Image (cartoon, grey):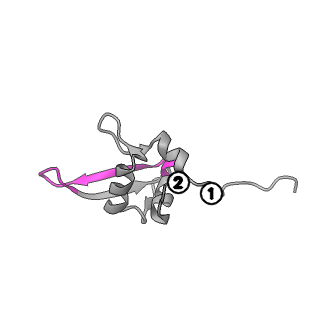
Amino acid sequence: MNISKPQQRTLHALAQGGAIVLERDERGTLIDAECVTRDGWRLSDCDLAVFKSLKKKRLIASQGGGPYRITREGLINLRAQLDNRTTVRGW
């Protein structure tokens, strides 16, 4: 499956415990999608187009009206990426 770089970054943030929070207007129309990392930071790569693409591919889902999180399918399609938090051993 073809996944763009912004989609990959968003999936990585979601895999590490982040969530996508939607903003709607008074009629219920989507205005904005914002990805919040587990540390509370906003991911700038995540926008409405990225959200719709990930949802269409079923890589993210919401349960019980909560924020959108990564699905098992999303985890399977996620490419491996080195984690910045790894420590050097043996030094």
Please report whichever mark, 1 or 2, sits nearer to the chain's N-terminal start. Answer: 2
**Extreme residue toward the left, this view:** 27
| Label 2 packing within 10 angstroms: few (<14), some (14-19), many (20+) | many
Give whichever of 67, 38 is nearer the camera: 67
Name the residue: 50% across, 60% down.
Answer: 9
Q: Count every numbered label the image shows and give the total.
A: 2
Horizontal and vertical percent for residue 39?
A: 50, 52
**Residue that badge 1 annotates:** 81
Q: Position of residue 28 (x, y in %)?
A: 16, 50
Which residues fall within the magenta stretch?
A: 13-30
Q: Position of residue 64 (x, y in %)?
A: 31, 34
The amino acid at mark 1 is: Gln
Q: Are marks 1 and 2 in contact (CB under 8 Å)?
A: yes
Whether residue 66 is in magenta: the answer is no
What residue sits 79% from the left and 56% below the top? 88
| 23 inside magenta stretch | yes
Q: Residue at x 48, y 53 (%)?
A: 11
| 84 lies left or right of 72 | right
Say few, some or many: other residues with alpha carbon within 10 Å of mark 1 (under 14 / 14 to 19 / 20 or more): few
Residue identifier under label 2 = 12
Left or right: 79, with 57 as reference point: right
Residue 29 in the figure: left or right of residue 67: left
